[in-house]
Image: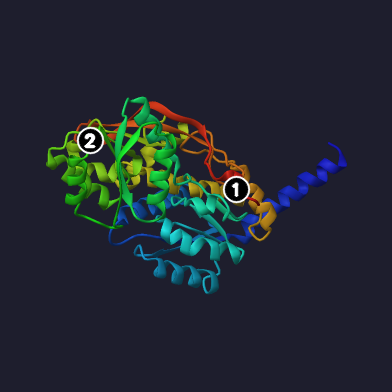
Amino acid sequence: MKLKQLILAASMGLAAAAAQAEGVKVGMITTLSGGGAGLGIDVRDGFMLAVKQAGRSDLEVVIEDDQRKPDIAVQLADKMIQSEKVDVLTGIIWSNLAMAVVPAATAQGKFYLSPNAGPSPLAGKGCHPNYFNVAWQNDNLHEAAGGYASDAGHKKAFILAPNYPAGKDALTGFKRFFKGELAGEVYTKLGQTDYAAEIAQIRASDADSVFFFLPGGMGISFLKQYADSGVDLPVVGPAFSFDQGILQAVGAAALGVKNTSQWSKDLGNAANEAFVASFQSEYGRLPSLYASQGFDTANLLMSAMDAADVNDQDAFRAALEAAKFDSVRGDFKFGPNHHPIQTIYVREVIQEGDVFTNKIVAVGLKDHADAYAADCKM
């Protein structure tokens, strides 16, 4: 081996050793109480399962509940950065909370790894070298749903979502790929539980299909009320409205519904098969989309820790960009704005014994990048 190569190999080895010796402190701010708590619990459990399996003594995780309130999330982020001296932040589920926390955190030199929220401003003009989204850009799953709705022959869709950043991105994404007309477009209140008025609007419209994005408890409420309403239009949605926790609460009313996701428990790669089995063994339930994203986020972080010292920001950023970890999605890569380029699948809600779950029935969008990367100047 040439001298230059020996020196480079030695320096890389020293950097990796220093990274392990120094350690990394992570601040996880997520929703653990109130509406939407199941989403944060799943992200937390997926993340901590990966940490446990790796058996790392050089990774400390501080976990706090944001209560789905932006002001609480900001206070917690300030505390973690100023008092806890965290190196990396993660955990936020809701895009309005992400918009309140992420720009300030990255401006203070912290890395932020999003296991869920992917608001469009942070993918485009508001991108930052220290911000990485390990899940998706908000529009992505809805774009695939719009494309599927067109392929399925739907020509007049009634669409609805909550009135917050992710809801606006959702309907924008659906409309970007849907080739038909809209029979109605409605923004509901975030956290809403009564959808009688919206279902009446759907009934009175000339829609031939319904698309909705209502994550967490909102989706449970809507689906139950929709099933009881007698409105018999086919429904299409993103995985957020038909994910594992939601399906158990909704039951048979969701059977046969098509939904879009970048992950599913039946993806046949070794990392995913091991993840599904170990999550079920550890927690006594099937993993959700959110759990898979938490698991991938932790493994991405630990792959960077193996390659670089978090205090060497350029080296650590490069290690994150390389994404040298075994994702439960299979191949994983970041686009130039630090958002995934990935395949999005169409799933169908099925029943396996007493459990309602999903199976992949088609590819929605292959190797799909988001629409905002061109606006990102890093």
Q: Which residue, as the protein is rendered here, is positioned at the far bottom?
A: 83
For the residue marked with disc 2, what is the amino acid? Asp
Q: Is residue 349 shown left or right of residue 271?
A: left
At mark 2, the secondary structure is loop
Determine the residue positioned at 31% across, 53% down.
38
Q: Residue 45 location, x and y as percent?
A: 38, 51
Looking at the image, residue 17 lies above or below residue 9:
below
Q: Quadrant of residue 232?
A: top left
- From the image, tell me which residue sits under label 2: 206
Q: Quadrant of residue 335?
A: top right
Rendered image: mark on residue 186:
none
Determine the residue positioned at 37% across, 50% down.
167
Looking at marks 1 and 2 on the same chain, the residue that comes earlier in the sequence is marked by: 2
Q: Nearer the viewer, residue 71 or 293?
A: 71
Q: Residue 250 location, x and y as percent?
A: 20, 43
Q: Is residue 324 shown left or right of residue 258?
A: right
Pointer 1 local density, CA inside 10 Å: few below 14, some 14–19, many at least 20: some
Q: Nearer the viewer, residue 126 or 7?
A: 126
Q: Is residue 108 shown left or right of residue 116?
A: right
- From the image, tell me which residue sits under label 1: 375
Can you see residue 115? yes
